Structure formats: C-alpha cells, structure tokens
Amino acid sequence: GAGVSQTPSNKVTEKGKYVELRCDPISGHTALYWYRQSLGQGPEFLIYFQGTGAADDSGLPNDRFFAVRPEGSVSTLKIQRTERGDSAVYLCASSPQGTGDEQFFGPGTRLTVL
Amino acid sequence: AQSVTQLGSHVSVSEGALVLLRCNYSSSVPPYLFWYVQYPNQGLQLLLKYTTGATLVKGINGFEAEFKKSETSFHLTKPSAHMSDAAEYFCAVRVPSGTYKYIFGTGTRLKVLA
C-alpha cells in the first residue's frame, strides 16, 4: 500500500516568508508525528497528533511554527516569518495508534531559507 | 528522560567485513529501541526493533542488534558488509508513555570500501 507522502519534496523560500509543508499519512493511522532533521543531526521531535488534536507540541521551537490536522488524516506544518535557521529536512511519520509501534516515515521536505 | 548516544559519526568498512555501529541509551524504564536506515534523499526505513523478549533481534538486510541492559547498549551488526549498505544509520529510543515519540541519536554514516 501507499506509504507516507510529503509535499513538496523541496522548498526554497526567502527569509521572512510563510511556508506550508504537507503530510499524507498511511490510511487508517491515527498517530502522526513531525520531526525536524538539521544537517548532521538526528531527527528531533516537533509535534504529535492523535486524531485531530495536537496531543504534544512541546518540540515546536517557537510560536512561528504551527501544525494542523483538521480531519484526522492530512497534516500541514506551517512556518511563519521563516529564518535561515529553519533550513532543515522536515520529516513526517505515522503509526497505527500511537501505542509505540513502529513509526513509518515519509521522504521528508527539504526546506531552504535564503 | 531518555537519550541516545551513537559513537562514531562516520564508519568505514571494507566490502565483506564486519559492520559494527554503536548505540548506547539512557532510559529510566525498560526501553523500546529502534534502528533506522536512511539512504540518500529517502525517508527513514526501519531495520529492526527491540520491545520485549529475546534480546538478540534480527532485522532486514542481514542486520541484527543485541539489547544489553547491563551495558545500556543496542549495537547494530552485520557479518559481511555489502556496497548497498552504505547509508546513514540512526538509533532511537521511544518515550515509554504519552506521545511515544522517538529520541534519535545523531546518526552514523557508513561507508563501504570496495
């Protein structure tokens, strides 16, 4: 079946602009995670959804970052007033019920802020 | 709190030689541990996982890892390296409750020499 998909695969923007990154999880997976992977680092947790609600957003670096999942499937990560330090690969993962089973990762969106 | 340390950001082995990638963890409760592989421009793919039970875990592509509680380690091994094993490898520990988010190590890039 289809895996986790993310669009766009690459996004180049200018400092100060607004961007949206999209994640389509595996059908039926209720848990959805966003991670950020900076160059030379492992992925770092940003936010977790169980269904439609953000159950844990403790990893969001500041209030310029926001994410939604209005219908419990597709999620959008939104970044306002982008900064050069936001440049990274943003990874999305889903799992069946968020019970600790394997997380399935998408290919990521590479964000470059000029 | 959980944490992961991967010793050696870069490892080189000859084709056919033993692969050993090191991972040490810190966890206040019995951990769930994972190894993921990341090929260039691709998402994270699960190699293997330890949850409970047998401490020697076999995964895909001939990889295995042994959970050693006394050493707080979960090293990844493969008896004979293949050129196609060249990739970045991440060890992760799962937060045991709530979000079940992953805490990743910084990764080890494996290079296989002909």
Image (cartoon, coloured by chain):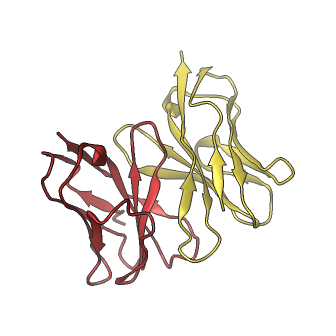
Chain colours: A red, B yellow
Quadrant for residue A2, please give it.
bottom left
Q: Provide residue A107's location: percent of width, then percent of height.
A: 34, 51
Residue A46 can be seen in this image: yes
Residue in the picture at 45% in, 68% down: A58
Nearer to the camera, A103 or B104: B104
Quadrant for residue A77, please give it.
bottom left
Q: Provide residue A80's location: percent of width, then percent of height.
A: 19, 61
Residue in the picture at 37% in, 55% down: A91
Residue A107 can be seen in this image: no
| Relative vertical location of residue A9 with respect to residue B18 in this rendering, above or below | below
| Relative vertical location of residue A71 with respect to residue A11 in this rendering, above or below | below
Nearer to the camera, B65 or A66: A66
The reply, left or right, for residue A10 in relation to residue A38 is: left
The reply, left or right, for residue B64 in relation to residue A32 is: right
Which quadrant of the figure contains the N terminus of chain A? bottom left
Residue in the picture at 62% in, 75% down: B97
Q: Provide residue A21's location: percent of width, then percent of height.
A: 23, 60
The reply, left or right, for residue A67 in relation to residue A59 is: left
Residue in the picture at 66% in, 62% down: B1
- Label count reads 0
Q: Provide residue B82's location: percent of width, then percent of height.
A: 56, 28
Which quadrant of the figure contains the C terminus of chain A? top left
Query: Which residue is farthest top?
Result: B114
Quadrant for residue B113, please give it.
top right
Query: Which residue is farthest right?
Result: B70
Nearer to the camera, B2 or A32: B2
The reply, left or right, for residue A39 in relation to residue A22 is: right
